[in-house]
Image: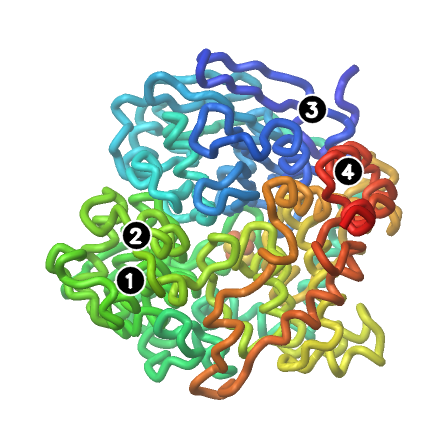
Amino acid sequence: MTFPYKGYAGHYLEVDLTKGKVHKREMEKEWARLYLGGTGVAAKILWDRTGPETDPFSPDNVVVLGTGPLTGVMFSPSGRFMFASKSPLTGIWAESHAGGFFGPEVKYAGFDFVILSGRSPKPVYLFLRDGEAELRDASDLWRRETDVTTDMIREEHKDPDVETATIGPAGENQVLYGCVVVDYYRAAGRTGLGAVLGSKNMKAIAASGSLGLEAYDMDKYLEANQKEMDRLNDPLWKDFLVSLRKYGTTDLIAMINEIGRLPTKNHWTGFFDHAEDIGPEIIAKKYRTGHEACHGCAIGCKYIYQVKGGDYPSGPAGGPEYETLMAFGSNCLNRDLESVFHMGTRCDLLGMDTISCGKTISFAMDLWETGMITKKDTGGLDLSWGNVDSMVQLVEMIAKREGIGDLLSKGVRKAAEIVGGEAWKYAVHCKGLEASGQDPRAHQSVGLTYATNVRGADHLRSLSCLEELGFPEVAIARFGKEKAAAIMDILSPKHKGEVVKDIEDLYALVDSAVICKYGTMWPPIFYFDTFENIIAPLTGMDDWSSKKHVREAAERICHLRRAYNHRLGITRKEETLPKRLLKDPMPTGPSKGGLPDLEHMLDEYYQYRGCSLTTGYPSREVLLSLKLDYVAEELERKNMLANCYEQKN
Ligand code: SF4
């Protein structure tokens, strides 16, 4: 039977790297209907094919490259795609998204998903073009940085429009936070997906396509799309969109420092005295040379920078985002902006996640200050706070796993285990993933977001921006007038369990559709009704116009990813925060004295999610209501259902 739904390319690719074989298969109808695409479908594939016995670096691990029905179609923003796997950094669910032009090109080349398994005996890359796929020799590409790799692939095909997703030397060397880079400087950064590809001798995926995508009912789809695009013009968020276009995410340095939430000195505090030195105004005035947008994006938050001369000339390249400015800037007490540009760009070229890299360096600086590591360990490097020369050298050493770079290439959790003693106190992570640029002591719901996030301490699965940005109208519309005041209080834990659960559901659809978080998270323009309006006329899946179906699909995806982690040992005990963010009151700045009330928020979250308050395990009833019977069966066998666990214990 032919795959009936539109908006999809209609095929996926199975790649057995051990045998060097590719198999083109028709998309599964149930994948689209129940899991939509992207993260939802990847969760189903990884649930079926990986588990507790899968070593992330073994040929058994599977990497899913996924797009969604909104990738590459007329919708803004529609340039996104994602990778998922079992993470070598955290040992649990791994997922990372990026924008640019690669995702749409994969669909135009005829594929919605690529599933990679096995390990190639020699370096290879995958080339997709107009419904055909082949593995090609990548021996000459191995050891190359990401920009050179892209140029060489384009040259090989005599086609400057070939889009690539490539790993760099860090992924080849299995730095645990090695990432995948597209369009030279956009990264699927987190959870070490580049390292998994490196372990498979898989250098890159390249795509070039001219196949079109269809809508099921074009007139209705255009009408629905126009309605959604009109939302962008609402005066409610005009200023935010203007600022996003003008400054990109660099604007957050100023905004977040103002509320005392900017990670500073390895998360010791949330206020950086020198935030202006790495902030939006100086970047815009002195270094910004251009402006870019991902495929089909009307927001256009990207900028190009260049540093000419000085100690660290770099660019022209994609300008560092807020997270990179924070990780190599405030969090290392570094106010030398040009060095931050340099390190961000080096990470893109080496294929390393800037957040985990910067956070691991700040962790090392803390150990240096306490005397837990000395010049003997660092090979003579002085790791005093803000020592940019040492930081710049560390970035290179980590990518090569040279000297102390080998220890730091493992991320803060494993590095702390190796150093031993009290090093764990300085390892700011959840479930092994280094914290991104938020601090829950200044924003209660961030604590819950970090603790429950399926990939670790990260904001992109459930961060609530309503209280941060100040949208009481939106809080009233979504949660009712009675709850809105407490929801809008950034320092109140009240109702945050409900809010985080709601946002996590919403982002699960965003990540399955697959679209950009800007416009949904910041500012909160799109909501569940966007999917009700747009998916059915695009795809022909009528049930997606029902509110119930849309909400259930979102919950199904969230429960499936959570269950994936339960099977790997994650319970309420692991859904917690590092000591520094949970027990040490904020020492300085506007949020001085703040601490998250995590237990209160967790109880509420589990109630809304339909999980045990003791373990975080889901109930059988909830799983069955979401058509996750196969998950319920397996969790029951493992004594991991809320009801069966509580009865037996
Ligand atoms: S908002 Fe920014 S990151 Fe998102 S799609 Fe547009 S340009 Fe890309």
Write down the residue under mark 2.
Answer: 408
Q: Residue 295 carries which label?
A: none
Taking depth in this image into account, of 445 and 88 the one nearest to the observer is 88
Observer-side mark, 4 or 1, equals: 4
Write down the residue under mark 3.
Answer: 27
Observer-side mark, 3 or 4, equals: 4
Write down the residue under mark 1.
Answer: 364
Report whether 377 appears left or right of 77: left
Q: Does the residue labelled 3 lie within 8 Å of ligand 1?
A: no
**Where residue 394 sits in the image (x, y, percent)?**
22, 55
Judged from the image, the secondary structure of the residue bearing numbered disc 2 is helix
Q: Residue at x 29, y 71 (%)?
A: 286
So how many labels did they put on this image? 4
Question: Of marks 1 and 2, which one's residue comes earlier in the chain?
Answer: 1
Identify the amino acid type marked 2: Leu
Calculate the distance from the C-alpha at mark 2 to the C-alpha at mark 4. Answer: 39 Å
Judged from the image, the secondary structure of the residue bearing numbered disc 3 is loop
Question: Of marks 2 and 4, which one's residue comes earlier in the chain?
Answer: 2
Calculate the distance from the C-alpha at mark 4 to the C-alpha at mark 1. Answer: 42 Å
Q: Which residue is drawn at 32% across and 22% down?
A: 138
Write down the residue under mark 4.
Answer: 636
**Contact? badges 2 and 4 (CB < 8 Å):** no
Q: To which quarter of the image does residue 565 belong?
A: top right
Identify the amino acid type marked 1: Ala
Q: Is residue 584 visible?
A: yes
Observer-side mark, 2 or 3, equals: 2
Observer-side mark, 1 or 3, equals: 1
Calculate the distance from the C-alpha at mark 1 to the C-alpha at mark 2. Answer: 8 Å
**Where residue 590 sits in the image (x, y, percent)?**
49, 88
Q: Does the residue labelled 2 lie within 8 Å of ligand 1?
A: no
Taking depth in this image into account, of 519 and 588 the one nearest to the observer is 588
